[in-house]
Image (cartoon, rainbow, N blue to C red):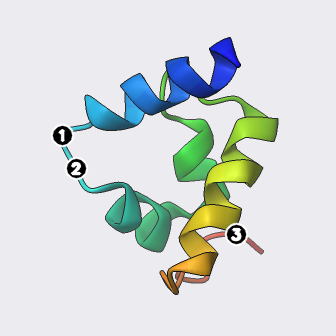
Amino acid sequence: MWAYRKAAWAVEDLQQDIGLVYQQMGIRGLESIPGVGPQMALEVEGELKKISVPVSNADP
């Protein structure tokens, strides 16, 4: 549960919209957010896909 809170706080503190980070950088962009590790980035990606946030071809 703590990991989700830390990730939520990190996303809340972002200067840029999380959808924009994902669109421009894909999963690597999510992983670059402090407090968001690889597994949490996959969770966030899943949530973003549910709301139809497209991603660029940043990840091969």
Mark 2 or 3, nearer chain start: 2
Q: Residue at x 52, y 50 (%)?
A: 29
Q: Position of residue 31 (x, y in %)?
A: 62, 39
Q: Residue at x 33, y 66 (%)?
A: 20
Mark 1 or 3, nearer chain start: 1
Q: Residue at x 62, y 27 (%)?
A: 4
Query: Label 2 belongs to which residue?
Result: 16
Is residue 13 found left or right of 6 in the rendered image?
left
User: Disc 2 marks which amino acid?
Assistant: Gln
Looking at the picture, does residue 4 appear above or below residue 49? above
User: Disc 3 marks which amino acid?
Assistant: Asp
Inter-mark Cα distance, 2 to 1 = 4 Å
Q: Position of residue 1 (x, y in %)?
A: 71, 19
Query: Label 3 belongs to which residue?
Result: 59
Q: Residue furthest top?
A: 2
Query: Label 1 belongs to which residue?
Result: 15
Q: Residue furthest left?
A: 15
Residue 35 got which mark? none
Label 2 element class: loop
Q: Is residue 54 or residue 32 the one in the foreground?
A: 54
